[in-house]
């Protein structure tokens, strides 16, 4: 069974450009999460989808970030326009159910560098 | 005060010894607690979770939870070089159906052969 896959693995863009990150969750997982780790800091929650609906987007830094999950399958996270402080590793995770103790499986992350 | 605190390390432990990793959390309403292991450049992978006070054992790993002290730990017995990684403590917060993980910064563990 394929795990959570993220594309691209690395992205280097200039300040002001747009970048779109993609996450393919494990098939059948309704719950999809985006997290981010900025250099030297902890992994922080950004957003939670249940199927195609945003359950919680309280962690999104500002309106330059837009997440979508069309059809409840893969998800994209767009940053427009990118700023230097957006650099970090963006992780996607998926979970089968909303039960409290079910495991969230993480992708390998997309390392975003804004220069 | 950070919501989840871990000693960043690095923690060096001789091969075959017990590695002890500690974590404290600030939200008394936290329900469940997770330990993830992350190798450099790889995805975090779940080692164990615990939600009841006391110990939970799985192979060489034992998680300990003390909700009164808001403390959770991970013990690794018979440490192996392959255990060298960053260990992330995470707390599950949020209402039912809206759980999300709050992480500590991680403890870097090195097992010395």
Image (tube, coloured by chain):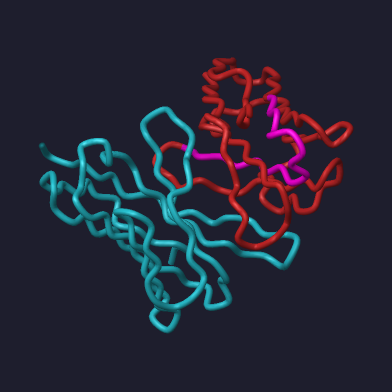
> Chain B in the picture: what colour?
cyan
Q: How many marks?
A: 0
A97 and B24: which one is in front? A97
**Relative image position of residue B31 (x, y in whole percent):** 57, 71
Q: Is residue B94 above or below residue B86?
A: below
B9 and B83: which one is in front? B83
Q: Residue at x 12, y 39 (%)?
A: B112
Q: Residue at x 55, y 24 (%)?
A: A112
Name the image quarter holding the N terminus of chain A. Answer: top right
Residue at the farthest right position: A71
B108 and B84: which one is in front? B84
**Relative image position of residue A77 (x, y in whole percent):** 72, 31
Q: What are the residue bounds of the magenta stretch?
A: A22-38
Q: Is residue A47 above or below residue B58?
A: above
Q: Quadrant of residue B73?
A: bottom left
Residue at the farthest bottom position: B68
> Chain A in the picture: what colour?
red
**Relative image position of residue B35 (x, y in whole percent):** 43, 54
Q: Residue at x 18, y 56 (%)?
A: B18
Q: Quadrant of residue A109?
A: top right
Q: Decide whether residue B7 is among the magenta residues.
A: no
Q: Residue at x 52, y 62 (%)?
A: B91
- A33 sits to left or right of B113: right
Q: Is residue A23 above or below residue B34?
A: above
Q: Decide whether residue A37 is among the magenta residues.
A: yes
**Relative image position of residue B66 (x, y in whole percent):** 40, 77
């Amino acid at each position: 069974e394929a795990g959570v896959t993220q594309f691209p693995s690395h992205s280097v863009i200039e300040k002001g450009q747009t970048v779109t990150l993609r996450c393919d969750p494990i098939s059948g997982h309704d719950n999809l999460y985006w997290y981010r780790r900025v250099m030297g800091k902890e992994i922080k929650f950004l957003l939670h989808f249940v199927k195609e609906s945003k359950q919680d987007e309280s962690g999104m830094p500002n309106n330059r970030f837009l997440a979508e999950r069309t059809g409840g399958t893969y998800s994209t996270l767009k940053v427009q326009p990118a700023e230097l402080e957006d650099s970090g590793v963006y992780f996607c995770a998926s979970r089968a159910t909303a039960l409290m103790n079910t495991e969230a499986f993480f992708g390998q992350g997309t390392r975003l560098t804004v220069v | 005060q950070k919501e989840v605190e871990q000693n960043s390390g690095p923690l060096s432990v001789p091969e075959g010894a017990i590695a002890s990793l500690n974590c404290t959390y600030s939200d008394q309403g936290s329900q469940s607690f997770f330990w993830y292991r992350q190798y450099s450049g790889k995805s975090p992978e779940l080692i164990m979770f615990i939600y009841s006070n006391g110990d939970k054992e799985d192979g060489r790993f034992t998680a300990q939870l003390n909700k009164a002290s808001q403390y959770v730990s991970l013990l690794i017995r018979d440490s192996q070089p392959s255990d060298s990684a960053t260990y992330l403590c995470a707390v599950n917060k949020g209402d039912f159906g809206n759980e999300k993980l709050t992480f500590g910064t991680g403890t870097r563990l090195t097992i010395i052969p």
